[in-house]
Image: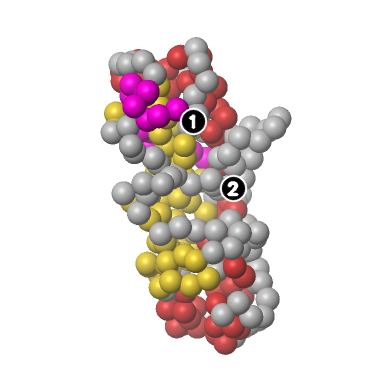
Amino acid sequence: MNSITQWAQNIKLEIEYDGTNFSGWEIQPNKRTIRGEIEKTLRSLFNEDIKLIGASRTDAGVHALSQIANFRIKTRFPISKIKGALFKLPFDIYIKNVTQVPLEFDARRSAKSKVYFYRLLRGRSPLLQKRVWEYKYQLDTKRIEEAMPLFLGVHQFDLFSHKDEGECEIKHLEFTQSSNEVIFEIEGNRFLHRMVRMIIGTLTELGRGKIKAQDIKSAMELKGRKFLCAPPQGLYLKEVKY
């Protein structure tokens, strides 16, 4: 592995994207991904392989208001030219900012926490269906609000993950609602695979009366079972904190 001193520049990108037509962030064979599209554009500019490091490996269909990524290059290059080249990206990816950062900066490892929000729409909307979870059931939001503190703090979230295991710290979890929409916001130091969606799915099952708060407590103690995983289109990466 190359020593960090061999690199001339470290470039940080702030990225917004609509995840509808992507198979997620991470490169996959013969599939359209956000990282793949950006790296392809950067390769045409630098004429060399570029490894883009993303703060979050968002799943297929998940969106981002502020994904952070970085890449290192061996020769110095004007930031203005990098910005110009990135204007050629597809319409569903937008580079909001391009800055030079210290060589030690790593978008994933340097992150202190990540903030996501999830949009749940009561009813249907052809205009919003790829950006919200269209939800047809009544929810007891008081039960949801009372159960939210169960997730706060440091816990093993193995039963709230598709395949990962490990300890995470949830720093903040809340929801707001209007006449037809509920928005959940969650901040954590890290998240396991599909963890945010499984927490949201669990809270909706609680709000429908399909499970009890005690079921959530048991799952936090690695007992019981996994619950519903909310669909991807309602999830947004809002912010990465450093």
Q: What segment is highlighted magenta in the picture?
A: 1-18
Coloration of the structure image: secondary structure
SS for callout 2 = loop
Can residue 10 be found in the magenta stretch? yes
Can residue 203 be found in the magenta stretch? no
Q: Of circles 2 and 1, which is in front?
A: 1
Please state the horizontal and vertical placement of residue 71, each as a whole percent of the image. 42, 29
- Image height check: is 127 above or below 210? above
| Amino acid identity at mark 1 | Met
| Amino acid identity at mark 2 | Asp
Frontmost residue, 91 versus 5: 5
Q: Across the whole image, how many numbered discs are drawn on residues?
A: 2
Frontmost residue, 143 versus 58: 58
Q: Residue at x 66, y 35 (%)?
A: 28
Q: Dividing the picture into quarters, in which one does residue 73 lie?
A: top left
Q: Residue at x 52, y 40 (%)?
A: 18
Residue labelled with disc 2: 59
82 horizontally vs 63: left or right = left
Q: Dividing the picture into quarters, in which one does residue 3 lie?
A: top left
Q: Residue at x 41, y 47 (%)?
A: 109
Please state the horizontal and vertical placement of residue 141, each as a whole percent of the image. 49, 78
Please state the horizontal and vertical placement of residue 54, each as a whole percent of the image. 47, 40
Q: Residue at x 47, y 65 (%)?
A: 168
Neighbour tally class for label 1: few under 14, some 14-19, many 20 plus, Cα within 10 Å: few
Residue labelled with disc 1: 1
SS for callout 1 = loop
Q: Going by the picture, which residue comes out furthest to the right?
A: 30
- Image height check: is 9 above or below 48? below
Neighbour tally class for label 2: few under 14, some 14-19, many 20 plus, Cα within 10 Å: some
- Which numbered disc, 2 or 1, marks the residue that appears first in the sequence? 1
